[in-house]
Amino acid sequence: MPLEIVRIPVLSDNYVWLVHEPVSGETMAVDPAVAEPVLAEAQQRGWQITQIWNTHWHPDHTGGNAVIREATGCTITGPAAEAERIPTLDRLVSEGDTVALGAVTARVLDVPAHTAGHIAYHFVEDHAAFVGDTLFAMGCGRLFEGTAEQMFANMRKLEVLGDETRIYCAHEYTMSNGRFALSVEPENAALVSRMAEVTAMRERDEPTVPTTIALERATNPFMRASSVAELAERRAAKDRG
């Protein structure tokens, strides 16, 4: 049976993902910024949160950890390289490790750049990846603690997950990312078409993620950058606004 994945909008533009494995009944929260909406959604669905998976240390990804664990007794998994900055972690993981949710297993990928120890979780058989703030719809994370070289490598690592792989990122940044992407590739027909669709979705207050590797390969200026230098130039231009 496939995973059931629920989007929970919190704060101004964050998404927490609630992932339910129906065979075992286990439920996991990805990057809970806050606790209350996550606990409420799980309770409404009759799900028991048994795990939290963190992708990186930022408070808008870990702020709900302690309260959710106190309420549920769940275990918390996160990046080994950021253990000192996430004191609630029970299990430390890095590339090469696997994490199980009931009958389903995800592999851990190291994707540093936004933060020094950022990781992602890839459910190979379910064609789903939880990437935190590394890859966004038509965007990538700011290089707060890493380099353009690292982010360029991340794009190469993620683009080979398969075109059908759904990418679950942690923010609704698609409109601003798309406007920047159009400034880079105004003649990209796939991008023009996608932005028209995204604009209509946001006007209806609909979410624009998850995205897919296929969409990002066609329209994301950071995944489409041909070199480290080009990615660095594009990231600097996006940061300037």
Image: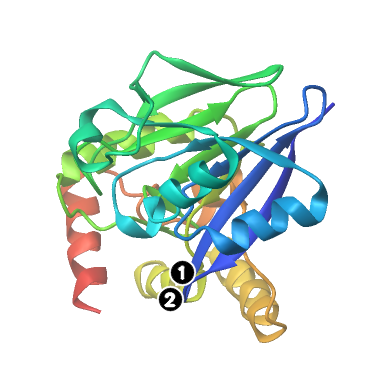
How far apart are labels 1 and 2 at the CA level?
Answer: 6 Å
Mark 2 residue element: helix
- Relative to 97, residue 136 above or below: below
Residue located at (18% from left, 60% from top): 233
Answer whether labels 1 and 2 touch (C-beta < 8 Å): yes
Kind of residue sitting beneath label 2: Ser
- Using residue 130 as the reference point, say whether residue 7 is left or right of it: right
Q: How many marks?
A: 2
Q: Residue at x 23, y 45 (%)?
A: 115
Q: Nearer the viewer, residue 206 or 34?
A: 34
In what quadrant of the picture does the N terminus appear? top right
Query: Disc 1 marks which amino acid?
Result: Tyr
Q: Secondary structure at mark 1?
A: loop
Residue 176, which numbered label?
2
Vertical comparison of 42 with 75: above or below = below
Rendered image: mark on residue 59: none
Q: Residue at x 59, y 30 (%)?
A: 162
Per the image, the residue denoted by label 1 is 173
Question: Which quarter of the picture shows residue 56?
Answer: top left
Q: Is residue 159 shown to the viewer in this render?
A: yes
